[in-house]
Image (tube, rainbow, N blue to C red):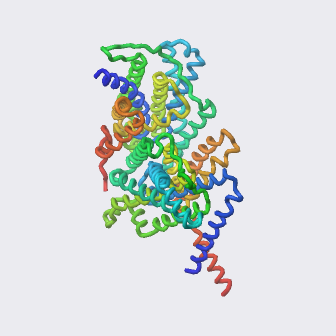
């Protein structure tokens, strides 16, 4: 088993390295941008899946936490990171210095977003169902308007990630997708761990969960904070790949979009969220051939898919190769015997 | 002091528009437990219908009471038809689906109407014709009430009174209340639930259409994305009042309009958009069922 995991890991690293090396050579900048946005959308969607799909708490303010992560990481990079990066680059080769620095704003953005998630979650999670959804929507908008009024991060002008002498942008797809893979893997492990079992218990029946000793409030706040952490990571990734952020990117429209990924993919399915986030982020771009009709086709497609598959594309199942692999191995063993 | 009174008058006029839109949210939530996110777009269609009707019939040139009435009725009729169609196409097939599915189709319909509006009517803002000549109608010292504000207020009050009559005094109104209370029991008593739900959409959307005209009168710049933020805020107003409660939606709308105007007037207009949500959260935390909502008992 261990040999096989090592093999899978090696294949993954090779694929990422190939992406890092090949993508800028094979794809034009337009496709690179789309690929970057898909990566960000995947993390955001899976992080919302954690709290909505697995814990059953509907949040439509997720873009607010992305905004916290994006702005916190961008401020860190602009005000301090540029200097640190320059200092690192003096003693280390440029690529290594950048690789060492890159996780820092992501973690900082995530941490601050998790803190915001705690602050919002502790009062808001007392509410249920639609009222919780509305409260999170409100918190998301409040976060956005507050950031809009902070002049140190550009206010209404937007915030450009630039510091003298260093490049703060990270556009390399390999590094970006490494973050995506690690984030999704951590969240998937969490969702199917014993903590995740508590999440799902709260989703299925809060009262029953409480009565068998699941600390429901703590579980909900934990899920919310973890979800916010990864939303913050997505925001930080967005900020550092785009190089310029504006609060308009984090309005409730973005929150709706993330919710659509989760519901369309199937509530309670990590792989469903990944698929829906990828397809729906790419769709408006792939439909560009239709010119002005593209957003109309997108909207009609959304309605049609929801009517045909109300439980979402994947339901609550996962795309998991392991059962197929196991069957294939059994057949293989039988053939050899 | 005069300034404060003036702001209050402006706020009430603005809030009555929110209230009309909020009624549609609250009625639909009452019967379906669905947040109809496409409602803001219905209001946009109302304003657009008014704009084109006024121009086609030549009311745009000279203000007249007849012109206003015709335009208002045209917008209400169009929106009623639109609302009923949306219900039939996007929500009825999902009546027994998981609760989030119709929410997503609502977002889909909202996107569809925004983009269809941009494609067919152009994304550039249009200027709503002055169907009511702007002049000062009443003056108390330094306090001035324009006749546009009076028209907005009077129209809103008449429509809300009409709605109250329909809901409380007619057979369909009773059927609507029955469906809101318990759709299954209402069906057993012979209430045609689907028709009543469609009627609810019809009424709510007609009110949104009227709100579209009123906003065009007081705030003439209209465009296909105009429904987005007011739609959301009207929804907040509905929650403030207690979602599902008709008097709650009226009060919530007025309250929100007044508070927003005061914040914009005395604090800062950039915080105007946030204040709606700050109030919302404060109310939700201290009185989760809203001002007029009944507290829900949880059965174990």
Instruction: Examine the image and state in which quarter residue B147 appears.
Output: top left
Q: Is residue A231 shown left or right of residue B189?
A: right
Quarter placement of the N terminus of chain B: top left
Q: Residue A288's x, y, as percent? A: 68, 45
Residue B147 seen in this snapshot: yes
Quarter placement of the C terminus of chain B: bottom left
Residue sitting nearer the eye, A297 or B167: A297
In the depicted structure, whether residue A139 falls above or below residue B201: below
In the depicted structure, whether residue A142 falls above or below residue B74: below
Residue B179 seen in this snapshot: no
Q: Is residue B293 shown left or right of residue B222?
A: left
Q: Residue A243's x, y, as percent? A: 56, 50
Q: Residue A295's x, y, as percent? A: 62, 42
**Residue sitting farthest toward the front:** A90
**Residue in the image at 36% along x and 59% along y:** A206
**Residue in the image at 67% along x and 46% along y:** A287
Q: Is residue B248 shown left or right of residue A254?
A: left
Residue sitting nearer the eye, A1 or A55: A1
**Residue in the image at 49% along x and 48% along y:** A255
């Amino acid at each position: 088993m261990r040999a096989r995991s090592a093999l899978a890991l090696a294949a993954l690293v090779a694929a990422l390295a190939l992406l890092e090396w090949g993508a800028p050579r094979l794809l034009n900048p337009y496709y690179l941008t789309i690929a970057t946005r898909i990566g960000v959308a995947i993390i955001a969607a899976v992080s919302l899946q954690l709290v909505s799909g697995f814990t059953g708490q509907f949040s439509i303010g997720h873009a607010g936490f992305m905004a916290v992560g994006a702005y916190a990481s961008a401020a860190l990079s602009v005000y301090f990171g540029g200097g640190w990066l320059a200092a690192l680059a003096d003693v280390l080769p440029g690529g290594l210095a950048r690789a060492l620095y890159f996780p820092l704003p992501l973690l900082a953005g995530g941490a601050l977003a998790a803190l915001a998630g705690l602050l919002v979650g502790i009062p808001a999670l007392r509410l249920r169902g639609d009222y919780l959804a509305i409260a999170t929507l409100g918190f998301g908008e409040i976060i956005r308007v507050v950031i809009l009024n902070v002049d140190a991060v550009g206010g209404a002008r937007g915030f450009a990630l630039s510091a003298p002498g260093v490049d703060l942008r990270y556009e390399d797809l390999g590094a970006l997708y490494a973050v995506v893979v690690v984030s999704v893997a951590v969240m998937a492990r969490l969702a199917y761990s014993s903590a995740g079992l508590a999440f799902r218990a709260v989703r299925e029946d809060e009262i029953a969960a409480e009565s068998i000793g699941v600390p429901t409030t703590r579980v909900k706040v934990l899920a919310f904070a973890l979800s916010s952490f990864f939303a913050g990571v997505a925001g930080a990734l967005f900020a550092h790949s785009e190089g310029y952020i504006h609060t308009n990117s984090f309005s409730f429209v973005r929150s709706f979009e993330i919710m659509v990924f989760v519901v369309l993919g199937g509530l309670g399915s990590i792989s469903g969220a990944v698929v829906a986030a990828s397809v729906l982020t790419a769709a408006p771009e792939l439909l560009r051939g239709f010119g002005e009709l593209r957003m109309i086709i997108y909207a009609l497609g959304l309605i049609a898919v929801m009517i045909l598959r109300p439980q979402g594309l994947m339901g609550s199942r996962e795309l998991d190769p392991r059962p197929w692999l196991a069957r294939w191995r059994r057949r293989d063993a039988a053939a050899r015997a | 002091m005069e300034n404060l009174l003036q702001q209050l008058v402006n706020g009430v006029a603005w809030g009555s528009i929110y209230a009309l839109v909020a009624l549609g949210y609250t009625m639909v939530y009452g019967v379906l437990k669905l947040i109809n996110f496409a409602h803001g777009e219905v209001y946009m269609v109302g304003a657009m219908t008014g704009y084109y009707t006024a121009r086609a019939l030549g009311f745009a040139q000279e203000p007249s009471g007849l012109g206003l009435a015709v335009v208002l009725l045209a917008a209400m009729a169009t929106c009623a038809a639109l609302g009923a169609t949306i219900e039939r196409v996007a929500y009825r097939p999902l009546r027994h689906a998981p609760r989030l599915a119709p929410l997503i189709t609502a977002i889909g319909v909202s996107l569809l109407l925004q983009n269809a509006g941009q494609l067919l009517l152009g994304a550039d803002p249009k200027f709503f014709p002055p169907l009511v000549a702007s002049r000062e109608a009443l003056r108390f010292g330094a306090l001035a009430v324009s006749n546009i504000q009076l028209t907005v207020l009077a129209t809103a009050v008449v429509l809300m009174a009409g709605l109250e009559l329909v809901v409380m005094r007619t057979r369909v109104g009773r059927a609507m209340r029955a469906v809101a209370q318990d759709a299954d029991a209402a069906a057993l008593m012979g209430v045609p639930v689907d028709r009543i739900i469609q009627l609810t959409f019809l009424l709510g959307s007609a009110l949104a259409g009227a709100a579209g005209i009123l906003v065009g009168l007081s705030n003439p710049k209209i465009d296909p994305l105009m429904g987005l933020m007011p739609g959301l805020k009207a929804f907040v107003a509905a929650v403030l009042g207690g979602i599902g409660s008709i008097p709650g939606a009226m009060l919530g709308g007025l309250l929100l309009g007044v508070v927003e105007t005061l914040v914009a007037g005395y604090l800062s207009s950039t915080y105007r958009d946030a204040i709606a949500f700050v109030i919302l959260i404060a109310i939700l935390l201290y009185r989760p069922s809203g001002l007029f909502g009944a507290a829900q008992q949880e059965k174990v």
